[in-house]
Amino acid sequence: MSVVESGLAVVPPGGRRRLPSLLVVFCSLVLVGLAIATFFGRSLAPKDPSVQNLLDAGAPPGHGHVLGTDGLGRDILSRVLVGTRQALEGPMVFCVCVTLIAVVFGLLAGFKGGWTETVIMRATDMLFAIPALLVIIITVGLLGGGYWLAVGLLVILTSPSGIRVVRSAVLAQRNLPYIEAARTLGVSNTKLMFIHVLPNILPNVVASILLDFVGGLIGLSSLSFLGLGSPPGASDWGRMLTENRPLLEGNPWAAVTPAVLLIVTAFSVTVLGDWAFQRLERRNNDRG
Amino acid sequence: MSILWWLLRRLVIIGLQLLAVSIVVFGILYLSPGKPEQILLGTQPANPQVLAAIRAKYHLNDPIVSQYWLWLRHALHFDFGRSIQTGQTVTGAISERLPVTIDLAIYAVVLVVLIAVPLGLIAGTRPGTFVDRGITTVITIGFSAPAFALGLASLYVFGVTLHWFPIYGVGSGFVDRVRHLTLPAATLAMMVIALIARQTRASAMRVNDQDFMTFARVRGLTPRVIWLRYLLRNSALPVVTSIGLVIANFLTGAVIVEQTFALPGIGTLVLDAITTKDIPVVQAVGLLAAFIVLMANLVADLSYTFLDPRLRTRTSV
Amino acid sequence: MTLKAPDLTYIYYLIYPVVYEKAQALAAGADFGGPSGLVMGTGPYQIKSFSPASGATMTRFDGYWGAKPAAKELDIKVIADPETLRLAVQSGSVDGTFDVPAGSAKAWESLPNARLQFGSSGTVKMLFLDPTQAPFNDVHARLAIAYAFDRPGIVKALEDGHGDSANTISSPFGWANSGTPAEVKQYFASLPVLNFDMAKAKEELSKSATPNGFTLTVLVPSSLADLSGMMETLKQNVKSIGITINVKQVPLANWLDALRAKNKAPMGIVSISADSPDPLSLVQSLVTGGTDGFSAYAPAAMLSLIAEYKIASPARQLAIAKQVVTQLSTDMPFVPIVYGNSKYALNKKYVYTSDITGWTAFGTEWAHYVEAAS
């Protein structure tokens, strides 16, 4: 998922400084909450997420279980809290890796041109339109590999679009006067790339990271939904959704909670991605 | 003329890419644990003779290269063998299920075009307003919700509670089919609608700002002309280029949506085939998916050239 | 057809082959049994259309020699997702199903327009413990595991309360034709009960060669949630006595592969049904002495007993069955967990006039028993 493709490549008019809207504040709070859950989930959880209580399975909220229990009698609230880390670490690693690869190769391709560019762009073209998730379903489904195999494949298959975007952003910058000026001054290519160009494409990069995070979150939870990826017993939101679907009549919270969390997380990160892009782009434009 | 040359070159490349895909899929199938004949038997006691007979029938004992070569030779005649699980010809199974998936995809595309583009245009031409913010929020939710969550939610709300739509199957006859496929198509389209609406909005905002738009308005052209002749055409470009992504998204989304709504399409076929290691089916569907993706990109690239005259002068596309 | 050696238990296998019309089969050729070739059988229904994708339609054949079933047409649909199936039954677009997944009976029982019937099946969910390698080459380690299952709890949570704790892998369901019910009941009562007793488990483990516990990896199939659930409970329970189990979820294919592999894993889990209503049907498919089977457990004495069983008189068969099952309880190479149930959901418009058992779906002409409710 790239910035251009997601439709962020433009900033709406209205240049005066505005305070972040209520929505953005809300989403930031959500992210803060998620961060807390990621790092302190274990200690915040009222009960041990893996302790089973078979005789109390599928029970609605009550008896010390704020959100009820799942099919094996485990406390939903605890599982969801502890599962935050599980749910977010994959997308986190994914988006950081994709962005690193995209920035490095995009800069190289956009800047160096010539052979470097051709090789990189041919490679990206080949991988670009491959439906990543389908390939992962087939590969992980057949090989029975795990979560990190899926993450790795997702990185490889999503990087091409990131590289493309960074490269076009770099191309847009390349012919600008300031680059020309720096060149005549004898600044080296590497310095040009990292010290001059990179800050100017930063809005794209930042927004990309956040959107890739969302893409990773949705992709990986879809895999869990199909039963591929995370092991059983793991407090994974996507997996909880599938496992607890039969409980919708008895204890709807078991399935609804992870679903809502997934959607709210993705939503918040997307909104913040948009907002970050707009703020950074505006700052760039103001600077001239 | 150069277009034709280019087209020819592309088709050759596509042929090679398909070959590569078939080799890779075959390789993964071969390497993955689990033997098809065991899955056929399940947990029934395994008589060595029975196992051997099944293996012989499907040439599972041959070295991998000759197995692949055998498959390739038949494939070039469009004979993709028979499913190990059902004994049905693979082409038969696919042709039976393909219409369902295609209907689903077409319906989803129609929804995308009807909903996404107008939404994006409306939002893009009044940025920052309440309408824009409202639309953007709805779009963002559609963008962030995983297809399976949305699908299940709509199934329960519209199908089970409100009884507006049937909850599984494909129906017979045109109207019935439309009824059956509405929820699945909407779910499938959701992510793409969100994507395209965002893009259209961004495009529209950018285009709206351009000089030629101001000039058109000053000249007194009716909004309708402005929209159709200038806005749409110029905004369409990025949308068209992402058709490849859209198709890719649909292919994957179809698997999840078909699973959720119990549609007998290619998606459920491939999931079943993967679970049961039905080699001929996985090979054929993998190839089909690759073909669709490559063709979609080809069409997108072609229309890219036609939509933007500025690109036609370039010799390399 | 002639058998290589006499086998009295073979009589049960005769329900499996289908008698069909030879001319039609030959004419259909490679398409026989498929959507274009179909099958011509000898039952009260004829197949009008069939496809693995969309299901089958069967119409009643009025020239049938026997009693006419009530339903004029049977429309079999394919719905892979169990929740969707339940919704379909709820909405009335599907009248009945044999495919009620374990663990969801509560949801199905709350359907206002359908009735859920249960019956015993020959399904046993059990663990395989490989007695030829550590740690389970020591019977005390095996017994430790046997006491680490909360069977009633599993029945309640994973089998919806419809199932039974299993003390032996030969389900009482298979003893229907052997001895009198009183005799069978008495025998089963005499077998050691496998309570959920971690103290006893610890005691057994301390007597074994690995008193401080050990680490294992167990594969479970991702598509069978009940087996996953059972492994999860075991994993939790044995933590306290030093046994660490890594539960690894794999696709069905991989799981089956591992079950039959030459290098067996120390522990495996499976859900398996007897082929016939015979006390040793399941046992004789597990204790084969061959290498393709699931288990390497094959003591010579038991193998010869099983061989004798095939040609023994009914009284002697009963005695052998008891002997074999008792031996299995002592050796515990297979840890029985629970007996599953067969389930049938049917719209209240109809009534199923017979019992539901493990043989109903594939071993009887079930369509005969579906009648309109009065």
Image: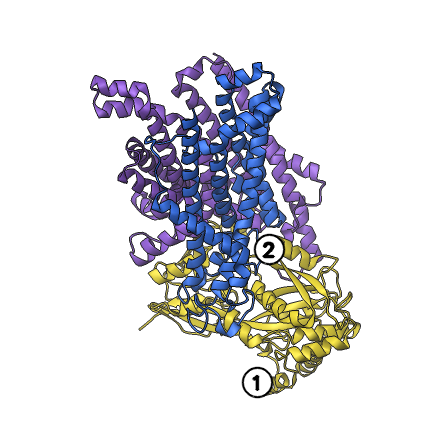
- Chain C appears what colour? yellow
Tell me residue A122's x, y (percent).
Answer: 58, 25
Q: Chain of mark 2?
A: C
- Residue C207 visible? The answer is yes
Nearer to me, C196 or B59: C196
At label 1, counting other C-alpha atoms closer than 10 Å, the crowd grade (few under 14, some 14-19, many 20 or more) is: few
Res A1 seen here: no
Q: Residue at x 46, y 51 (%)?
A: A32
Chain identity of mark 1: C
In terms of secondary structure, where does tag 2 sit? helix
The residue under label 1 is C181
Looking at the rendered structure, the kind of residue marked 2 is: Leu
Q: Spatial distance from mark 1 to mark 2, Cα to Cα?
A: 38 Å
Compared to residue B211, the image places residue C317 above or below, namely below
Closer-to-camera residue (B272/C44): B272
Q: Amino acid at mark 1?
A: Pro
Give the colour in which the image draws chain A.
blue
The residue beneath circle 2 is C252
Instruction: Give x and y (percent) for residue B76.
Output: 58, 31
Rendered purple, the chain in question is B
Relative to A181, is C211 above or below? below
**Residue B249: mark:** none
Towards the viewer: B248 or A62: A62
